[in-house]
Image (cartoon, helix red, strand yellow):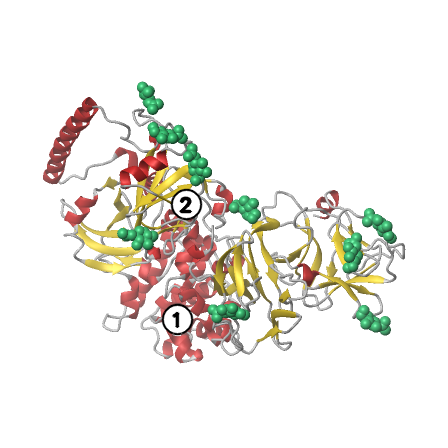
């Protein structure tokens, strides 16, 4: 590590003055002419912050000088020098009149005697006089990047007119200033505004009322989380206006506000128990109102799992950033426009209609008698990319920005210009082409009708070769089989499930997927992967339907419904220990198969009793696997917006770290506690901490008295050794540290008594949950919003 660092970094220079040259110890102070190089760093006195060279993930090997949290394992930078130039020399130069300037080129030995640089406990780097601490020449707080730390002021200097503004990084690996910024309104009001390209205001906080900002009542001293920890101050005098917040000295928390690469202004607090940054404030609330969040030629969707999607005929400009939820690069055409201005030519560009949208920004209004004229006007100008007509003709030139789907409450129609090849069956149709098409259609319909009747008669499922063993249903088939979706079985995380009966009288469960924006081809590919997975403890996918925007999955039907009903419903008969054990082992086997034996490892991501189905003999079948992949990268957002799932989420979900199979292990552990106790884990936290079952078990185990649980009547007729093993496994599964958790394969063996397991430590993460501390209350509030 050290050698790699040295080979590609240059010294950090501060004030080129000819004075002492002493070796550098781990210290918070750099004196004149001292150098930092390689992995040397300055560390603030209390150890909170470090200054040195860092390499943001995805920076393509570039190193930056910056400040980061020294005590937090997840690399979190709060300041970067030379963002624009990525110069590895950092020079603070002070001119004669003591007005500091920052430069990378000027090597001017202008002498200011005895100057030092000090990294303070609040993350501020000061350049000041060696003996006079109040003679500050320069500070990093004045050179704010994308992070607003407690104690820093986001100000507007009324004398100079200078607004101190935070600017987002260009992308997650590049600190170069991006498109989004936040600062006080340059027009002089007392509100903060979020700006795109330094000019377009896309959010404003509202003026300061004396207690809070009009548009952000939650950010007030009395209403904030954790309400005792912060102090707020808004100052508006003749010289300057600023807002600042501080963390009270007795509260040991790290908190920061950032302007994210996707244009959101967010505040985080570090949750020690979860080892993760948790968001407690985000603006704007409606993501699609961030100007240009989805970039050009894409559609923003407030409710869908992934907010941005390219329009038909367009592809992501930067797929790598797209995966990291940074869509600002937008989309580009697959096929350039021909732009032939001659309506008799068949190669002329065509238009693709999108209904129910909120129209893009900056349209030009033109005079057109009707919609046809409007189209011709657009066609006649090569830079015209779209039009819309509802009485007035609107046309767009070059860039289409901020197009939003109907969730925005708007019902306009827009016609997007595409090359003719992007729209099948377009072009001027000659009569014989029409004849062939119509003739073909009639023959095809006849064929389909015959096949359909044969299929109904023979009661053999038609098999679509391209999709493996899966049946590709038509939507109308499913409408018919489910009697127009009349019998609802339940509502899952991804959509509603209906009961249906196939022509061969097999009962099936038909799931209508919601919030889907995946292309047909990708959907088929994923579905076919899921269809190939067959295991006794995994629910079988029998078929699917993908028609237009409709996506449905057809599963085998489980007469005993889902596990949660049997565990928690007061009306149902309590499951015997034997059945519970069978269920626990079965689920573990199913998951072990998904994790270890499938061709591509599949992480379920949403293990909970609702997703475990029971067949007639109470053999468990894991449902909904593979959907995480179907939904793609934004799965975590879907998850955390779901009420009730929070109790099963592993801490790494909140931190945004890479999710491994161990996240499933955590959820499995939480569920195992519920299977054992027959009660919900989280319910009990609210009534009494003492009965938070997972903690009770952990403590009892350590006291060596699992049989004690039996006396309390929690579990009837349990095999004591099986029970103890199950309790131990559950405790191991919910360890905060992924590597402490066993694999699913190991769990199967432990539960079956094939291998032994040590006494688990009390899970730290659960301890926090059990205490019902401020953190956790807040944490579950955020997650259920
Ligand atoms: C030095 O400071 C003065 C006063 O602030 C300023 O006008 C001048 O531009 C500075 N010199 C340089 C080289 O920046
Ligand atoms: C360095 O400082 C001197 C004054 O001390 C000034 O005359 C000269 O222009 C400066 N050099 C540069 C490169 O700014
Ligand atoms: C320390 O610096 C401040 C600000 O430059 C100045 O007002 C003060 O007089 C200095 N004190 C001493 C003892 O030099
Ligand atoms: C905010 O304050 C400014 C003056 O400071 C005023 O012009 C403006 O109307 C105020 N805005 C609102 C929404 O009250
Ligand atoms: C941002 O603004 C600048 C100047 O106002 C302009 O030249 C530039 O084209 C704008 N960038 C975009 C992407 O619109
Ligand atoms: C349009 O194209 C056709 C065939 O290519 C040609 O005969 C006609 O003159 C063109 N019309 C114009 C206005 O260019
Ligand atoms: C396209 O053709 C129409 C009429 O045929 C004409 O009025 C218009 O100027 C032409 N536009 C271009 C860009 O050639
Ligand atoms: C096309 O539209 C743009 C923007 O309105 C305009 O500047 C340009 O002159 C137009 N071109 C033609 C050929 O009409
Ligand atoms: C057409 O759209 C404009 C802008 O969205 C709207 O103000 C107007 O009411 C619409 N007209 C009709 C007839 O719907």
* Image quadrant occupied by the C terminus: bottom left
Residue 210: where, in percent of width, then height?
A: 54, 77
Could you tell which of marks 2 and 1 lies nearer the N-terminus? Answer: 2
Q: Is residue 564 above or below residue 343?
A: below
- Quarter of the image for residue 419 reads top left
| Residue denoted by label 1 | 681
Side of 156 where 18 appears, left or right: right
| Left or right of 675, for residue 742 | right
Q: Quadrant of ligand 8?
A: top left
Residue toward you, 403 or 495: 403
Q: Residue at x 9, y 39 (%)?
A: 457
- In this rendering, the answer to whether 287 lies above or below 429 is below
Q: Quadrant of residue 383?
A: top left
Q: Is residue 216 visible?
A: no
Q: CA distance from mark 2 to mark 1?
A: 42 Å
Q: Secondary structure at mark 2?
A: strand
User: Of the numbered discs in the image, which one, if any, rests on residue 298?
Assistant: 2
Q: Residues within 10 Å of mark 1 (few under 14, many from 20)?
A: many
């Amino acid at each position: 590590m050290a050698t790699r660092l040295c080979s590609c970094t240059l010294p950090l220079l501060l004030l080129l003055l000819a004075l002492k040259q002493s070796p550098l110890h781990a210290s918070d102070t750099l004196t004149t002419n001292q150098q930092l190089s390689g992995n040397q760093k300055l560390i603030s006195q209390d150890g909170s912050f470090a200054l040195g060279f860092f390499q943001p993930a995805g920076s393509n090997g570039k190193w930056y000088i910056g400040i980061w949290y020294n005590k937090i394992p997840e690399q979190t930078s709060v300041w970067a020098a030379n963002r624009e130039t990525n110069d590895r020399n950092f020079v603070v130069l002070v001119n004669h009149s003591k007005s500091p300037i920052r430069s990378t080129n000027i090597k001017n030995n202008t002498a200011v005697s005895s100057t030092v640089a000090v990294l303070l406990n609040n993350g501020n780097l000061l350049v000041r006089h060696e003996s006079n601490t109040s003679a500050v020449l320069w500070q990093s707080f004045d050179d704010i990047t994308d992070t607003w730390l407690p104690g820093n002021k986001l100000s507007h200097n009324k004398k100079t007119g200078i607004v101190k503004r935070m600017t987002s990084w260009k992308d997650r690996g590049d600190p170069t200033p991006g498109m989004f910024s936040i600062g006080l309104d340059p027009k002089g009001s007392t509100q903060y505004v979020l700006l795109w390209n330094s000019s377009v205001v896309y959010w404003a906080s509202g003026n300061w009322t004396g207690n809070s900002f009009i548009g952000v009542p939650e950010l007030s001293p009395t209403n904030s989380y954790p309400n005792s920890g912060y102090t707020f101050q808004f100052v508006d005098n003749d010289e300057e206006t600023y807002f600042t917040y501080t963390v009270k000295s007795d509260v040991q928390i790290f908190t920061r506000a950032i302007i994210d690469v996707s244009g959101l202004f967010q505040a985080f607090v570090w949750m020690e128990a979860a080892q993760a940054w948790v968001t407690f404030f985000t603006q704007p609330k409606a993501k699609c109102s961030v100007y240009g969040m989805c970039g050009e030629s894409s559609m923003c969707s407030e409710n869908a799992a992934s907010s941005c999607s390219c329009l038909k005929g367009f592809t992501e400009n930067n797929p790598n950033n797209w995966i990291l939820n940074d869509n600002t690069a937008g989309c580009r055409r697959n096929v350039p426009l021909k732009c032939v201005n001659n309506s008799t030519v068949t190669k002329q560009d065509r238009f693709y209609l999108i209904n129910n949208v909120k129209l893009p920004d900056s349209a030009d209004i033109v005079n057109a008698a009707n919609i046809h004229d409007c189209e011709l006007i657009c066609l006649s100008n090569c830079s015209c990319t779209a039009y819309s007509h509802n009485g007035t003709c609107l046309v767009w030139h070059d860039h289409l920005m901020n197009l939003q789907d109907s969730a925005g409450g708007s019902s306009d129609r827009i016609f997007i210009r595409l090359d003719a090849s992007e729209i099948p069956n377009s072009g001027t149709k000659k009569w014989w082409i029409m004849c062939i098409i119509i003739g073909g259609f009639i023959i095809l319909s006849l064929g389909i009708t015959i096949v359909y009747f044969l299929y109904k008669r023979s009661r053999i499922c038609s098999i679509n070769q391209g999709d493996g063993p899966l049946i590709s249903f038509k939507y109308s088939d499913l409408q018919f089989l489910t009697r127009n979706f009349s019998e609802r079985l339940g509502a899952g995380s991804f959509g509603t499930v209906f009961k249906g009966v196939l022509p061969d009288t097999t009962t099936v469960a038909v799931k209508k997927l919601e919030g889907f924006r995946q292309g047909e081809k990708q959907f088929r590919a994923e579905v076919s992967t899921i269809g190939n997975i067959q295991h006794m403890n995994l629910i079988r996918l029998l078929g699917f339907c993908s028609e237009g925007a409709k996506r449905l999955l057809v599963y085998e039907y489980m007469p005993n419904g889902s596990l949660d009903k049997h565990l928690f419903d007061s009306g149902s008969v309590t499951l015997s220990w034997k059945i519970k054990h069978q269920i626990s082992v079965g689920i573990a086997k199913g998951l072990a198969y998904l994790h270890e034996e499938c061709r591509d490892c599949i992480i379920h991501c949403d293990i909970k009793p609702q997703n475990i189905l029971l067949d007639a003999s109470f053999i468990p079948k894991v449902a909904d696997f593979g959907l995480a992949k179907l939904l793609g990268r934004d799965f975590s957002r879907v998850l955390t917006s779901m009420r009730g799932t929070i109790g099963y989420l592993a801490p790494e979900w909140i931190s945004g770290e890479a999710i491994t199979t161990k996240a499933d292990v955590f959820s499995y552990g939480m569920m195992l506690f519920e299977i054992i106790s027959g009660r919900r884990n989280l319910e009990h936290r609210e009534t009494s901490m003492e009965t938070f079952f997972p903690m009770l078990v952990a403590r009892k185990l350590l006291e060596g008295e699992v049989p004690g649980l039996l006396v309390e009547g929690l579990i009837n007729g349990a095999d004591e050794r099986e029970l103890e093993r199950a309790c131990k496994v559950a405790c191991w599964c919910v360890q905060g540290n992924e590597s402490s958790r066993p694999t699913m394969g190991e769990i199967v063996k432990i539960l079956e008594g094939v291998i032994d397991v040590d006494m688990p430590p009390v899970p730290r993460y659960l301890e926090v949950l059990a205490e019902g501390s401020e953190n956790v209350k807040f944490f579950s509030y955020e997650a259920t919003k």
